[in-house]
Amino acid sequence: MLVLIGILVICGLLAAILLNRLSPIAALILMPTAGALAAGFALQTAKFMVMGISDIAPVAGMFVFAILFFGVMTDAGLLEPLLRQVTRLAGSRPSLIVPATALLALLVHLDGSGAVCFLVVIPAMLPLYDRLGMDRRILACAASLAAGVNVLPWTGPTLRAAAALKLPVMEIFRPLIGVQIAGLAFVFAASWWMGRQEERRLAAATTTNRGSASLPAPADPSLLRPRLFPVNLALTAVVLGAMILSPIPPVTLFMVGTALALLINYPDAAQQRARVDAHARAALMMAGVLLAAGAFTGIMNGTGMLKAMASAAIAVVPAGAGSHIPFGLSLLAMPLSLVFDPDSFYFGVLPVVAQTFHSLGGSPVQTAQAALLGQMTTGFPVSPLTPATFLVAGLSGVDLGAHQRFSFPLLYAASLVMVAAALLLGVFPV
């Protein structure tokens, strides 16, 4: 009975989100609640929801304050010198311009937002690409590669994986640092290769038009604090370094970091309120999804539906195949981005896979790490289920299909490179 209800809940969740019948928040709350009531848990359902929410609260808090922290730093101009230096160093050689595009995207994507990354990088680099006659698909691909491989503790997929499996964010992320380094090495190698190929194409076409990049202008110059750049850079380095190297909970680091960033850059209370208001909408929307996800996982675990489905799945897993679940998932994770949006995958599919692997003696954290090697990481810039895909295509002036055909092979190759690195580093078994 629980197996059937659990399957119906997850199928209903996937259908509601994929068909755009319900918002992720509504689907994550209503579907499991209906299932729990149908299974006869009545008022216990509320207890399960609260338990799930309490488990997810630190992750939701981390996301809120990470958005505020990086938002304040961007407002203050932390990225301005970096953006300008990258565009100056790129010069007029495609073999340098394309890696510079990837580097710029990597730096801007530190806030964890693919949309912000594309909004900053593509308009900044597009004039240079056009003046040199370079293929705009390369611009879209380079930015997509850097943003896709740049998996961070505060990015959406990592937070969703942690929320869905009730795992500490850094337990998932730390073993992936070496894997991500391998992925980034591929990104810059691929960017250089694309630039070199474009250099040869332009030389063959005897293109002589040369120019310099237009530099990105800040949205509001009155918010910039250029004299405080060294202080802001040091504060950012301390927060990120402590997150990776220390046992201090990330939510605490971002809370303190946000408070200090506001005090240092905008000492007036009215200015501080204005900066918080400017970034609150994005932060609260994601926090709402995470809290709803906590309710979802709380109900699915509390009622036993997740365990029942995992037990049923074990019965059909071929003998000896259980240990290969993370490896198999890692190979499929990137293409699955074309089928599942992040909420439906991480909150609907991943918990069942993780519970199945756990029941066979594996660690759920390995399934989370396998998923992060492609599911809405390298996969999000070409997925039709994310607004960022349409944004990168629209800003680049490239047809969506052309962008997907050009970028998909390299994005999938980046995912496979990280899978190979994960196997070599022992992150999960083959």
Image: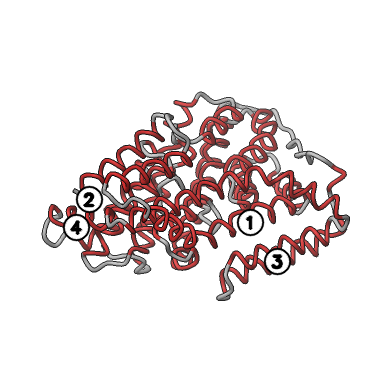
Q: Give the mark nearest the N terminus, 4 or 3.
A: 3
Q: Give the mark nearest the N terminus, 2 or 3.
A: 2
Q: Is residue 149 above or below residue 194?
A: below
Residue 372 occupies quadrant:
bottom left
Residue beneath label 3, please?
A: 256
The residue nearer to you, when weighing 148 against 204, is 148
The residue nearer to you, when weighing 291 against 146, is 291
Q: Give the mark nearest the N terminus, 2 or 1.
A: 2
Residue beneath label 1, please?
A: 66
Q: Residue at x 51, y 54 (%)?
A: 151
What's the distance in space between the residues labelled 2 and 1, CA to CA? 38 Å
Expressed as whole percent of the image width and height from the top left, the position of residue 313 reads 19, 53
Q: Residue at x 68, y 45 (%)?
A: 90
Is label 4 or label 2 in front? Answer: 2
- Which numbered tag is attached to residue 2? 2
Question: Which amino acid type is marked by label 2?
Answer: Leu
Residue 324 occupies quadrant:
bottom left
What's the distance in space between the residues labelled 2 and 3, CA to CA? 44 Å
What's the distance in space between the residues labelled 4 and 1, CA to CA? 37 Å
Other-residue count near label 3 (Cα within 10 Å), few / some / many at <14 / 14–19 / ≥20 = few
Under tag 1, what secondary structure?
helix
What's the distance in space between the residues labelled 4 and 3, CA to CA? 43 Å
Other-residue count near label 4 (Cα within 10 Å), few / some / many at <14 / 14–19 / ≥20 = some
Question: Which amino acid type is marked by label 4?
Answer: Ser
Under tag 3, what secondary structure?
helix
